[in-house]
Image (cartoon, rainbow, N blue to C red):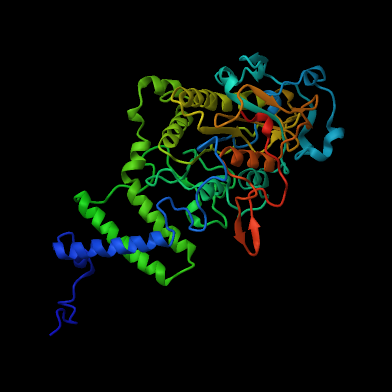
Amino acid sequence: MPPYSTSTQTLPHRRRFFNRTADGLLGAALLALSGSTATRAKERGHSPTGHPSDESGNPHYTPRARSVIQLFMNGGPSQMDLFDPKPMLTKHHGEAYFSKIAGEVENPQSAGALMQSPFKFAQHGESGMWVSDALPHLSKCTDDLALIRSMHAPSLTHEPALYKIHSGSLLPGYPSLGSWVTYGLGSENENLPAYIVLDDPRGLPINRTQNWQAGFLPPQFQGTRFRSTGSPVLDLQRGFEEPDGITQMERQFREALDGLHLETHPGQPRLQARMKAYALAARMQLSASDALDLSQESEAIHDLYGIGQEPTDSYGRRCLYARRLVERGVRFVQLFIDNQIWDNHTDLAGGLKGACERTDRPIAALLKDLKQRGLLDSTLVIWGGEFGRLPIAQLPGDKDASKAGRDHNKNAMVTWMAGGGVRGGISHGSTDDLGLAVANEPVSVEDWHATILHLLGLHHQKLAYPRNGLDERITGVSQPRVVDEILA
């Protein structure tokens, strides 16, 4: 009679086969099997960083930054109300101008006259950088900022503009910047995702999760959402208690079976990504909870970021999480704010002030905190939206000019970078007298992407992925330039 009868009464149950009380011989066999399979997996190039085997994971040249924190300002912040003062706009306030720019207006039915900024500007820092009084905290950090006032976008509609700024394409389905960076460089911490997204608990941005998709890159390079309240990832903790050694043995055995399964199903990127995700989730059980445990921070740090205070609590928490994540080797951290608080079509004064009140203090705190910890030199912080705003008013339905806002503007927008190899206290480029369009030293989205990659030690032409006979790049087939003028 065979050791096991074919009878259902004597056939070993699957749970029994994996039982934690298995004898030492079985345990040793499982460990030996998992070890040999792990070795074969390593030979196939499945590194713990999740980097593909056909890439080295090394930068093309010495990087100036090791990680990125992207502070994305959903909606399109107004350049002439924050960083680009326009005296001529004040001088000609109330004059008709729509007929001269009719083709550049998304909502012509509500277009009004030229509108001056409701905010006051002053020069700050040794650099004398112009910043409006809507940003009282960031204005104290100007000597760390490389301000780009001559950036422009190819679309004045949110959806394609968001696709473009995040993926380099106006169409959906392309990899995001964070995915390209982690594809090129991998991770410095095998216990945390290389690309983490901290979105707002009150709502997803326009285009939702497509903002951090991997597109045609292997799926493991997609951004991983971390919740900013409660457990960072749902169902992260173990469902029952057992010795850590036993848990590790079970994981090793499952990985061994996964490796064997993968060998019989080659060329399945989704399968490989799913396996990597499960393995990473297991390693994250301690690391993720620790990274987002703000109780480890002092009261002074909480106060610096505005945590526990309104309206800064939510965004302040995410800025502090971002610092703790890059401190632990996370490569790319992306922060979104709910909906599009910078999309001030009406009530410019109140809406833009509210957006600044929620974000200004936490962002300034992040820069100061990174700097005093010696992290700013190796962390590139980037701020900006998908386009800018027009110099004319956009009137509400009742045509009340006191409630006016600004419509979208693709021809001029403002962004800044700090740390990570950029020159602080510099303002690059300029717009015309009204802030309508770039006047000199234009910076395209492709230039912006190429500059970020350059600071990370990646050449935009060499960072490519073969697809349908073409080498795909985030900069496409364009010939962008690195904005050398802002580099340290």
User: What is the quadrant of the C terminus in the image?
Assistant: top right
Specify the farthest residue to the bottom. 1
Q: Position of residue 139 (x, y in %)?
A: 59, 18
Q: Position of residue 418 (x, y in %)?
A: 57, 28
Q: Is residue 178 visible?
A: yes
At 67% from the left and 33% from the top, the residue drawn is: 484
Specify the farthest residue to the right. 99
Which residue is more in the foreground, 443 or 423? Answer: 423
Q: Determine whether, in the image, residue 394 is placed left or right of residue 356.
A: right
Q: Is residue 217 above or below residue 86?
A: below
User: What is the quadrant of the N terminus in the image?
Assistant: bottom left
Which residue is more in the foreground, 430 or 105? Answer: 430
Determine which quarter of the picture holds residue 35. bottom left
Q: Determine whether, in the image, residue 419 is placed left or right of residue 399.
A: left
Q: Position of residue 130 (x, y in %)?
A: 67, 18
Q: Is residue 317 above or below residue 103?
A: above
Q: Is residue 82 visible?
A: no
| Total numbered labels placed on residues in the image | 0
Q: Position of residue 200 (x, y in %)?
A: 49, 38
